[in-house]
Amino acid sequence: MRRLWPTLVGSQAVTYGQALELFSLRCRSRNLSHHSLDWYKFVLGGFTRFLEANGAPSPRETTPNHFRAYLDHLRERGISSITVDRTYGGLRCFFRYLTQERLIPQNPVTLVEKPRKSQVLIHPLSMDQVRLLLAQPKVKTFVGFRNWVMMLTLVDTGLRLGGPGPAARPYRLAGQPSLCAG
């Protein structure tokens, strides 16, 4: 294993490469899954590539405007608001770590507002679409009848396929009162 800490003595500025390696060490020592490690690597790698293409300050010189510009860059590329929000969370975690370890004097992400997630309303099926859907299963067979009953339950109650069960949450249909899926 490489020895990282002797090169980071005193107020010496840490590079993004060193910071990423130290953060990765911290994540591995916390026994995070390899999926989490890969996700952090992906998110932080995208941010550092963006900074390199736009002036590449060190972590100590990174300002809230660098984060805002990166989040705006993601939106311009058509990245979903959920992914932008998760990216914000990954960057916030990384810079909180750098602040706790005193590798940077203050966390610039704390001054960046959390991005809003867009809310997509589910449009209900028309009566013709419902009739067409319910006409599809062959109700003379067991499997067909079972499928017809499940579809009828979904249509009558407004449930989604992922709705029934412990993970069910209330949701809204466009132009309809709020329905409970549980």
Image (cartoon, rainbow, N blue to C red):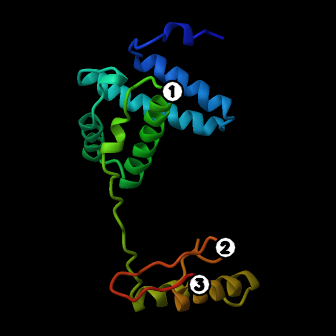
- Amino acid at dot 3: Met
Q: Nearer the viewer, residue 172 or 91?
A: 91
At 28% from the left edge and 47% from the top edge, which residue is drawn? 75
Q: Is residue 102 visible?
A: yes
Q: Are marks 3 and 1 in contact (CB under 8 Å)?
A: no
- Which residue is disc 2 drawn over? 166
Side of 106 relative to 32 (left or right): left
How far from the left and from the top, in percent, is residue 127? 41, 92
Q: Give the residue type at disc 1.
A: Glu
Q: Nearer the viewer, mark 3 or mark 1?
A: 1
The amino acid type of the residue labelled 2 equals Pro
Splitting the image into 4 quarters, where does residue 62 fall? top left
Q: Residue at x 51, y 35 (%)?
A: 40
Any mark on residue 101, and which? 1
- As drawn, the residue found furthest toward the front would be 10
Q: Residue furthest right?
A: 142
Disc on the earlier residue, 2 or 1: 1
Mark 2 or 1, which is nearer the eye?
1
Q: Position of residue 181 (x, y in %)?
A: 56, 81
- Find residue 68 and report its horizontal and vertical position in percent: 26, 41
Residue 172 at x, y percent in the picture: 42, 80
- Whether residue 138 appears in this view of the structure is no
In front: 50, or 111? 111
Q: Which residue is mark 3?
A: 151
Camera-nearest residue between 1 and 165: 1
**Nearer to the camera, 9 or 16:** 9
Secondary element at image label 1:
loop
Q: Quadrant of the C terminus?
A: bottom right
Q: For the residues labelled 3 and 2, say whether their Cβ atoms are less than 8 Å apart.
A: no
Does residue 40 appear to the left or right of 65 in the view shown?
A: right
Q: CA distance from mark 2 to mark 1?
A: 40 Å
